[in-house]
Amino acid sequence: MGNERGTNEVTVEQRVEALREVLRHHEHLYYVMDAPEWTDAQYDARMNELRALEAEHPEMVTADSPTQRVGGKPKDGFAKVAHSRPMLSLDNAYNEGDLRAWSERVAGGLALGESVRYVCELKLDGLSLALQYEAGRGGEAVLRSGVTRGDGTVGEDVTTNVRTIRSVPLHVSAKALKAAGLPQRFEVRGEVVLPQKAFERMNAEREAAGLAAAANPRNAAAGTIRTLEPNVVAQRRLEFFAYFLLSAGGQGEPTVGEALLQEQSAALKGLRAAGFLVNPNAKTVDSIDGVMAFLAEADAQRDGLPYEIDGVVIKVDAVAQQRRLGFTGKAPRWAIAYKFPARAAVTRLEDVLFQVGRTGKVTPVAVLAAVSIGGTTVTRATLHNADEIARLGVRIGDFVSVERGGDVIPKITEVVEDAKHARGEREIVFPAVCPRCGEVLVREPGEVDLRCVNVSCPARVEEELRHFASRGVMNVEGLGEALIAQLLGHTLAEATAEGAAEGANDAVEEPTRTALVHSIADIYALTKAQLLTLERVGEKTADALLEQVERSKAAPLNRVLLGLGIRHVGERTAQALAEEFGSMDALMAATEEELTRVNDIGPKVAATVREFFANERNVALVERLRGFGLTFTAERRVRGTTLTGKTLVLTGTLPTLTREAAKERIEAAGGKVSGSVSKKTDYVVAGEEAGSKLEKAQQLGVAVLDEAGLLALLQG
Ligand code: IVH
């Protein structure tokens, strides 16, 4: 690369390339190898430098730059595209007999006595995707598209969302291609999954926002990949596991004739060498006995995996043999999916309890006759709300079908009614008063849920404490469910049996001893002597807990804000508030208008934050926390001021800046980007194919800029 001044100085191009390369390397270490070598700060520093250089030199931005994961929203939804070759499903096997019968069919399709090797892989419970890579200019491969399975022939182009998945390489270097034995153009198929943790976080956020929780990680992943908001997808932390490699072909038969590598085991290796995330739990075996041993291993591993699997996929290793075996109408003969036994069972609904959550929401919980599902005894299942009960038409005494997946709370899927299973008689009646504190329950207009509005209800305090102490919030290790219940005045037996309200919908629980804690702040006043009065708490436990409590005081302001459990304030919002206001005091003093000026905070969140700090009890709680020395300040994010107070709307495609880059720069200059044009809009930035927003701006007389105009404005 030329250097205009003829010195040894590094040119901007060289620096940009070097940054991209090193960022890609560390992303691979972090997201694929799970072996990071950099701290987040080290990574961020390079990423910010690259972003700044690209902002100064927009002509250097390339689609495969690490800065370009989150792009603009797809304008008209997802386009339908045909797959290069059909994405078939697999035939299923449910037991050893099915597998042996399959292996005999395989043997029958090959020459007499020919040996066969099988590759066993985990069957990841997500949704399949096809990724196409095309030739880049410097001998590398770049991601061109990501398409869902759809009906197997035509899928949806979800490239904008696939790009946000960190384990999907946007770029495979020429060197990596060579090591992997891959050409510049190829197709990779694999499974998108939402890891358990990300699933739980997503549901917690949905619940905080008053939305229905996703039933399982698979549905959550499917919903996420079809979301029209790439930045939401980016936050969800989907993962992509590659398991199938194809040549970049035209359309045609589902043939494997064009396989790039001659064994499935080699394809997995090649994909790994090219930088894809390939599930490490795969094994090549040479008999069905070997397959059976793998199944046992997979079953034992299942609950410890960070994502869900629903079986094992077994493939004939040699592509030459695959080719000879071919396909039936809908599935390859050379592969089969062994499905784990369903984690479902039929049992009797004995009763319904009503649990009070952190926000006072009352949730009906099914009490079931104990039943073993996939090795775990289940006695409880969620019934969600009154609508769900009505949908199921369930009564106490009914036999119900219960499903359990991964760590998800068991769920009742239907009422069983046949000659052997008589219907129950007792209607499920929601209580009129809170089962914990006796306060009259309230149903807000337009909501399905009943709520206990007593902010001091012990059930609510219990949930607040659980949330406050949990990982990712104040992280007070050792302050678990049983201990919290004891701190609130219950005995350990009551706490673990959650028995008190059982069978008595309207009975109010009485604590059996005095509570040591009435609000989250009280944990900072606990003494060792008090802790020692609790069951199963000795010297060591007490000391460890006190140390953890003390340590939590150093948790940053965003965690404290999250811990307060303000409705609609999740991890990201808490972070934004801390960075924007820099202190608890500034936040408490903020008006609704100032709050809405923070990016990503809408009127709904602003109102709940205001409401929270307008409540005396909450202010008292905050003041007590201050008294205990919790962290009440944070580093403010310094913003430019050239666009302070200005609202801009982006429309159409800008010549060099992506939508996201333009938004970032406007926000960095203190401005706000809105999605719709109104009289309050200061500028509309219009690119090519700008539509109704531009028209509206012209109607309302709002100033319209092109990209050059925006850049000039940003300069101040
Ligand atoms: S191979 C022609 N391998 O299971 C080969 N599929 O029941 C097609 N799946 O549609 C797929 N893990 O969505 C393959 N290691 C794995 C898999 C896997 C999960 C899914 C995939 C497929 C379905 C078939």
Image (cartoon, rainbow, N blue to C red):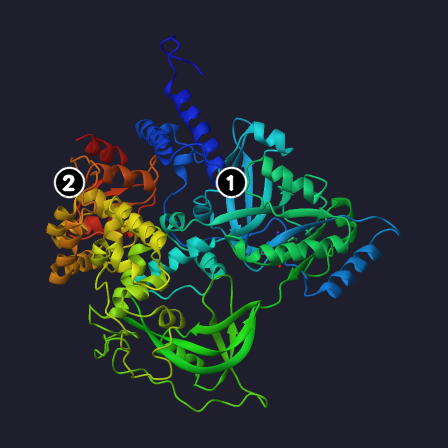
Residue 415 percent location from the top left of the image:
50, 82
Looking at the image, which residue is at 26% across and 51% down?
Answer: 573
* Rendering quarter of residue 248: top right
Please identify the quadrant where the N terminus is shown: top left
Q: Amino acid at mark 2?
A: Thr
Tell me if I can see residue 414 in this picture: yes
Looking at the image, which residue is at 47% across and 82% down?
Answer: 349
Relative horizontal placement of residue 57, taking residue 129 as reference (left or right): left
Q: CA distance from mark 2 to mark 1?
A: 40 Å
Picture disc at residue 644: 2
Please tell me which residue lies in front, 642 or 267. 267
Residue 690 percent location from the top left of the image:
31, 46
**Furthest-right residue in view?**
112
Please tell me which residue lies in front, 60 or 630. 630
Can you identify the residue that label 1 sits on? 32
Relative horizontal placement of residue 701, taking residue 549 as reference (left or right): left
* Rendering quarter of residue 713: top left
Please identify the quadrant where the C terminus is shown: top left
Residue 158 percent location from the top left of the image:
47, 50
Callout 2: 10 Å neighbours few (<14), some, many (20+)?
Answer: some
